[in-house]
Structures are given as structure tokens and as C-alpha cells.
Amino acid sequence: MASDATAPAEAGSDFIREIIQADLASGRHKTVVTRFPPEPNGYLHIGHAKSICLNFGVAREFGGRCHLRFDDTNPTKEEQEYIDAIERDVRWLGFDWGEHLYHASDYFEQLYQWAEHLIRAGKAYVDDTPLEEMRAMRGSLTEPGRNSPFRERSAEENLDLFRRMRAGEFQNGDRVLRAKIDMAAGNMNLRDPVLYRILHASHPRTGTTWSIYPTYDYAHGQSDAIEHITHSLCTLEFADHQPLYDWFLDSLPVPSRPRQYEFARLNLTYTVLSKRFLTDLVKNGRVRGWDDPRMPTIAGLRRRGVPPEALREFVRRIGMARANSVIEVAMFEHTIREYLNASSSRRMAVLKPLKLVLENYPEGLSEEFEVANHPEDPAAGTRKVPFGREIYIEQEDFMENPSNKFFRLGPGREVRLRGAYLVTCKSVVKDSNGAVIELRGAYDPTTHGGNAPDGRKVKGTLHWVSAAHAKPAEVRIYHQLFSRPDPGADGDLLADLNPDSLEILDGARVEPSLAVESSTATVQFERQGYFCRDPDSTGDHLVFNRTVGLRDTWAKVKAAAPAASGI
Ligand code: ATP
Ligand code: MG
């Protein structure tokens, strides 16, 4: 559960760092070598960020190195676009593999030679059993499997067939190479697993050189051994594969002896972290692409304005558990908010504008106010914000018949326009349906900068923009992509998609500094949340994404029920 999710997880404090520390202290390893091994069959998501931060993080902390290895053993699903995206995303997260970029496909020849080694040792055989039948013969958790009739082929016959598989003499699915272990093993992974399958497909790196491809199980550990990986860190679903991982390494003349350790996958409420499903969302146009800000992909989070520091901090906070759990997405948002609150510049933007005309402000006049970029950080500097006779305020900052608890604007009430003046609402203009379309008011010229010389109290402070200077903008507000915390719990993920996950406000007005700034940094729109400029923006059409709102549901969850944070 996520109850201890905000406890500090300093370097050395989780079980993996403890193992590494002990291995270095005992002299078992002189240096730590890890790897991040993505399959280039989709974009990376926030779950991968956890694995990246762990693998690259421990290498950095212990003075070792981390490899980026593309696990490119399945040519039918791999694309260059994914390879480029993965490299970009790892770098953006703040990590660097230096010269240590590898591909499982670099090892195809060595892996093949080792497969022949297994055949000669009587530890692998070519099986002609049709795949369906082979599956049925594997047995189940309660029933042992049955030996294939091809299991006792001689090494010579196996070598001949395997070489002909390589030479492309057979069709896809005609035969496989299997390890000869134990069809009655309690662990299903040891029931003569498949090492090679025939696949006449062009590979992005090796082209048509190969018509057989190794399986993940066969390729992974040996790739680790070739690269002298010391600690092969993977997620818990591979725990059952560990005996097989070790069996291969024990059976082959590998140059090093890596060890596998498993940690918990990251799961988040309201979120699906499965590349296959995310691929479907993109391919079926359910979202606007891999980097749609509603996607849990690293590219989506970046476009949404989440800084890499906040993502790394989130991973640090959730820690490295040995048991799977579900983390509240609100905790992720809390971490982003905390980071941005401290680091981001403040700006003014009115999302749903209502015009306020200051009748006593001279027509044609305008002035500029020097406004602080960050209320608690003078080093963040100031910027100039123009002011004029016509101002936009937020529709929800005005009430015609306000209660005593409403401290914003109402007829006859006075509020502060942040950093500018105190203003009073004098009258209301309505359309033929009775809807308020404009306010008329007055400013107090003695309150320049927003302070009353007589010290009179004004409770409400509103953000605003000058109608003559503000830039129109489209603002995209993102809600959870799924409408329930446990999407797919009823068996249908698509049915749980939130139809209202994207809300577009196309009449917003933002202060002019947001249009001229070349910076893509995420800023706080005062009293609204954190926003960043979307790449869809053009010279005269600004688009902003809401990274996260100001309201913190996680702080409330924590206060109400500290132990009940997971699902
Ligand atoms: P998916 O299940 O989304 O398709 P995958 O495991 O097939 O992901 P890989 O490209 O094989 O994706 O993953 C690369 C590394 O990232 C692996 O070591 C994997 O264990 C790790 N990883 C994948 N998903 C998560 C997650 N949710 N939390 C932590 N680590 C993850
Ligand atoms: Mg995988």
C-alpha cells in the first residue's frame, strides 16, 4: 500500500540499494553495472520512469554505470519511431548512458552459437509439434506437462534441423528450439521453454539476415552476461522466470554471472500502464497521440508540463517495495504541485473572462505595473504587466447577489486587482436573457500598486488582464483518462474511458508576457493552477495545457485516512 509513500527513500535505504551496497562491501563486485532494457514496441510510460530512475539512479549513486539496451527480439512490433522516443525520454528524465548503448540484436550470433552449445550438451532440441498442441502438452499449475515425441532427437539431428531453421528452409511456426529441462517442473517456465522461433520478418537492425529469433527469456540473461551486468533489476512478474534465467547462465560458458532482482511494478489509480493498451488508444484515435497530455507516457507528461525533477521526486517518494501496490494518482499530482509551487513563475491569465470597465480611468491611458514573479522568491525577479481602462476578470470572481462568505466582486463591493489598484463594482450590464455580460466600476487612483494608503481592509484579491493588451488563448484542461480508479475491473477498459477527459476553454485571455516568452517552462496561472505552452501554439493562436490544478486532493486524503491511501 502507499501509506508510507511520502517517507523519505534516501539512497541506500531500499532493499535493492542494500543488496548492492553489501555486494560492493564484500568484494563480490568491484563496481555496479545495471541496464534499462526496453522493448522498442511503444513509448515509455511512468512505470518505465520508475525502472529508469532505479537503474540509472543506483549506477550513479554507487559510481557504476547503466546501459540502455533495446530488447529488440521481436521484429514484427518494433519501429524506429519508438527507439528515438525512448532515447529522447530517458535523456529528458535526466539520465545518460554515455557510450553504453546496446541492442539484444547485437548478440544474435553469439546467442545462436550458445544455442548450438546447448544442443551439443543435450540441453536443447528442435520440436516439430504444432504450437497449439505444444501448448496443450505443457500441462497446468495442477498437472504436469507431457514430453514431446521429438524430445529424444540426437544432437546431430537437432544441429542439422536448427541450422536449417537458421538458413530459412522452413515456414513460420513449423518448428521451434526448446530447452530440455523438465516437463513436470512445478514452475511452468521450466517446462522445456522455447528458445527460438521461426519468423521470416525483416528486423530494423539486422534486416533479413535472420529467419529465427530468440525469445525474451533466452536473450535476456545472456545479454546481461555479455554486458557484465551485475544486478539485473526487473519487475515482479519475472520472479517466476528467475530459475530459468539462472539455468541458462549455469548451462552456458558466459563471460559473467549477473543476478536478477525483482521490484514492484508501479501501478496508479485512474491509469493503465500497459504498452499494448496504450498503443491501441493511439492507433484507434482515442487520444491525440502518444504525447497526448492525458497519456501516462513520459512524452505525454512532458507535453503536459510536468518537469523531470517532479517525476524523479515522485519515484523517490514511492520507494522500492517488494510487493505490488496501487499508488494514488493524487499523490503524483501532489508531488508535481509541490515542485511547481516552489519553482514556477507566476503569471496572470483569465480562463473565462468577464469585462470590467473602469469608468473613471482615462480613455486611451495605459500603465505598467512591476509584478513579482514569485511571492516567496525575490530572486525570481519581476515583470511588467500592462493595465488599462478595460480589464478582464474571471466570471466566477463576480456574483450579483453574493453571500457574506464571498469575498470577491459584487455590486458595490471593492476588491484588489493584484499588484494594480483597488476597484469597486458600480453596475451590471446584462443581455436580453438576463445574463451578466459586463461590469462597470471605478478604480481608486490613490491605491497604486494595490495598497490603500488609509489601510482599509479589502479581503478579495483577483487576478486580471488588460483587455487591450491581453492575448487570446485556448486552454486545455485535462481530467483523468479513466472515470474509475481501477479501470478495467469489470473486464472492459474501453468502457471505462472518461468521455470528458479533455475540456477546452477557447476564450481565455492571458497577460502578454506569455506570448513573447520563448520559454517553454511551466508557470503558475495565479489562482488557477500550473500551465505550460503547448507546441500546437502558433504566432496568433496560443494554446496552454493545464499541468495540474491548485486544489490538492492528496493532502486531504492523507489528513483524513493516513493508512487508506492504496486501493
Ligand atoms: P508493458 O507491460 O507496459 O508493455 P513492458 O514490461 O513490456 O511494459 P518493457 O519495454 O519490457 O515494457 O520494459 C522495460 C523495463 O521497464 C522492464 O525492466 C520492465 O520491468 C520495466 N517496467 C515496465 N513497466 C513497469 C512498471 N509499471 N513499473 C516499473 N517498471 C516497469
Ligand atoms: Mg516486457
Image (cartoon, grey):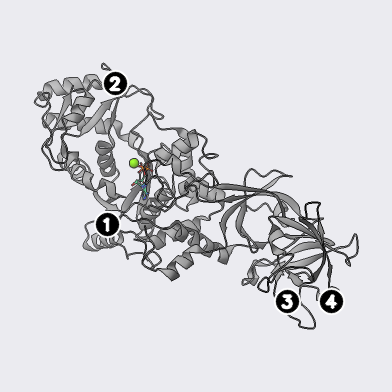
According to the picture, the residue beneath numbered tag 3 turns out to be 458
Residue 114 x/y as whole percent: 21, 33
> Mark 4 vs mark 2: which is more N-terminal?
2
Label 3 Cα crowd, 10 Å radius (few <14 / some 14-19 / many 20+): some
Relative to 304, 189 lies left or right: left
Query: Which mark's residue is nearer the viewer, 2 or 1?
Result: 2
Residue drawn at point x = 39 percent, y = 31 percent? 77
Choose top left, top right, bottom left or bottom right for residue 513: bottom right
The number of numbered discs placed on residues in the rendered structure image is 4
Choose top left, top right, bottom left or bottom right for residue 418: bottom right
Choose top left, top right, bottom left or bottom right for residue 528: bottom right
Quadrant assignment for the N terminus: bottom left
Query: Which mark's residue is nearer the viewer, 3 or 1?
Result: 3
- Residues marked 2 and 1 touching at CB (< 8 Å): no
Callout 3 amino acid: Val
- Residues marked 3 and 2 touching at CB (< 8 Å): no
> Mark 2 vs mark 1: which is more N-terminal?
1
Residue most extreme to the top: 169
According to the picture, the residue beneath numbered tag 1 turns out to be 30
What SS does tag 2 mark?
Answer: loop
Whole-angstrom CA distance, mark 2 to mark 1, is 45 Å
According to the picture, the residue beneath numbered tag 2 turns out to be 172
According to the picture, the residue beneath numbered tag 4 turns out to be 446
What SS does tag 1 mark?
Answer: loop
> Mark 3 vs mark 2: which is more N-terminal?
2
Whole-angstrom CA distance, mark 4 to mark 2, is 85 Å
Query: Which mark's residue is nearer the viewer, 3 or 2?
Result: 3
Label 4 Cα crowd, 10 Å radius (few <14 / some 14-19 / many 20+): few
